[in-house]
Image (tube, grey):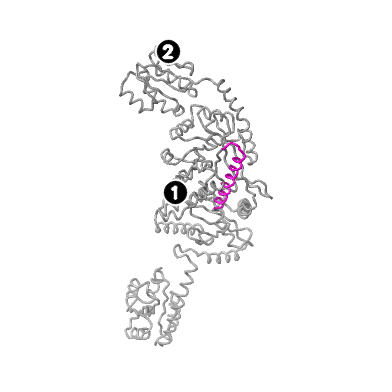
Amino acid sequence: MIYKTILVVEDNEINRTMLNTILADQYQVLEAENGEEALSLLEQYKDEISLILLDLVMPVMDGYTFLSIMKSTPDYATIPVIVTTQNDGETDEVAALAHGATDFVAKPYKPQVILHRVASIINLRETAAMVNQFQYDRLTGLYSKEFFYRKAKDLLAQNPQKRYDVICSDIENFKLINDVFGIPAGDRLLCGIARLYTRLVNGRGLCGRFNADQFVCLLEHGWEYSNEMFRNAEIEISAMSNTRSVSLKWGVFAVVDRTIPFEQMCDRALLAARSIKGQYGKYFATYDDKLRNKLLREQAITDGMEAALKEGQFVIYLQPKYRIQDYRLAGAEALIRWNHPEWGFQSPAEFIPLFEKNGFITKLDQFVWDRTCAALRSWDDKGLPAIAVSVNVSRADIYNANLADFLMNTVNKYGLSPSRLHLEITESAYTEDPNQIIETVVSLRNLGFIIEMDDFGSGYSSLNMLNQRPLDILKLDMKFIQSETAKPNKQGILRFIMGLARWMKLSVVAEGVETPEQMERLREIGCDYAQGYYMARPMPCDQFEELLREQAGSGEQAEEAEESQQEDRPRQILLIADEDETYRGQVRETFKEQFEVVEAADGEAALGCIADYESRIGAVVLSLTLSGPDGFSVLEILQREKAVWNICAIATASADAGMEERALEMGADDFAGKPHTMK
């Protein structure tokens, strides 16, 4: 049996013995002859002592001095004290109670009175401690959630004339802080926020802690809130918690309509804070009608999404994809549209992000995959051209262990090859969990699916990371295309990307092409495919089917037109860069029927020809012994200029194994040792 401990502070040994005898059967008893000894025992046993029996008149340190020191020390202040007095000591009793004593008993001691008083006060203290645990957050000392609600309601009721605001905060990625810096660092952060709230309120309201990293206060309105104010608070918290950069989002709800339940007021302040999560540079938001309407709208969308899928409100639209070289229909991208019976067509920009957050996107993606395969099967059965269609694979799909099985079951259900379904995965998804993405994509690619990196240019892929990704097609982001094609020909990085794609053996699709100038620029740099409003807007499946029929019916005409275009187009150029005029003449005579021949007698002239004719040059016969700069320098520039990586470069020089090896290592397609025949 574990006994509670009582400290008896009494200078009279007989009195100490009497009290010990009365208490010993039920309690563990510690004894002190004066206040100084009692303080020493308190320091040693402070967490074990349940009650103190104290005499007032003692040598060294009397009971009053002991009471004053004890009650001013937080570690001891809550321990109850029963003062022992003489029968006629009413003045002493009042003075003791004023110094913080809990009760008093008279001498001579009556055993049953002492036992009842001691048991009653210890029980009262333990009950209060339990209540206190429910009222206060143990870590920060702020009010607990339920007690905060109660106190806040009382404060509002008592001050109907005052204006109040509810302010809530939420830490972004608090679990990550605990994982990276450890639980103690997370606790220091929470305590720092609690101190900030306490200082902010400063007697003009109440503070509480909700659910781990969420804090709330009811604050008397005293100033206008600003982004700078909450930004400074975040900086201060980061500094005091020593956890580097901490991101807090704050929400403010102005208490105007007091008929709204207070719990709902707090919920609205938290909703305001959550509405700006992930938005850099935005530190607080106020709950207003605009936010309320947005949340109500999101709730209406969420409430209706399952029924919409069952009732066929979601429909597939297809945006045609064209081959730039001959402007022929080469495929399509499947897009989702929501035709609501009351609201009409809804913008995907509104419902797709919401579905990505609530997880419904996986069901919607699976619906798109199925309907797309059904359309492909229908067109094949009608004898229309066999094309491929791109479909989106969301981040949530990647983490589905059954993704590969579902996709294979879908294409098998309609008797299609996996290569007919191109799977689009956004560039940003590759940076979030690259190992998981790579593992999943590799397995899909091994099954025969074609992998596209969507929105390339909108994220921050490093070249090394891009090289590690299992890909077949790069899909350039619409905004990236629009900004890059607005730059002069010699500027921008589109040429670099095209060269990179050639090196990685990837096809390139440009999204969002809206003008003939953009289309021409993409054609000049060798982009493979394009889609956008310039060619065609997204359309229902039946309209796209008509496009396929037109293409099937105009096959022969297209071939004739192609032949005619070939005749009208300027011939490809063969650049002969050689210091020997006789040699240049021999090469010109040999190839003049197949190429338009352009000559250069030195390196500077060769580079000028490359700059002037880059989009028409089919091949270069390059002497390695050119002057100013030499052939190796020209070859190096050819390889560095990504726009002309597809030019065939044949290096020439006197037969020399070392020069041949060096030229081939630098990227020459072949080496012809002089003298040689022209066959």
Q: Nearer the viewer, mark 2 or mark 1?
A: 2
Residue with the mark numbered 2: 585
Left or right: 137 in relation to 415: left
Nearest the camera: 127 or 112?
A: 127
Q: How crowded is mark 1: few (under 14 residues within 10 Å), some or many (20 or more)?
A: few
SS label for mark 2: helix
Q: In which quarter of the image is residue 54?
A: bottom left
At horizontal 48% and vertical 66% (from top left) the residue drawn is 136
Q: Does the magenta stretch include residue 320?
A: no
SS label for mark 1: helix
The answer to whether residue 225 of the structure is visible from this angle is no
At horizontal 44% and vertical 63% (from top left) the residue drawn is 139
Identify residue type, mark 2.
Gly
Left or right: 46 in relation to 450: left
x then y, percent, for residue 213:
48, 58
Residue 675's disc number: none
Magenta-colored segment: predominant secondary structure:
helix
Identify residue type, mark 1.
Gln
> Start and end of the magenta stretch?
359-386
The answer to whether 159 is drawn above or below residue 483 in the figure is below
Residue 436's disc number: 1
x then y, percent, for residue 460:
46, 40
Q: Residues within 10 Å of mark 2 (few under 14, many from 20)?
A: few
- Earlier in the chain: of badge 2 and badge 1, it is 1
Q: Is residue 381 magenta?
A: yes
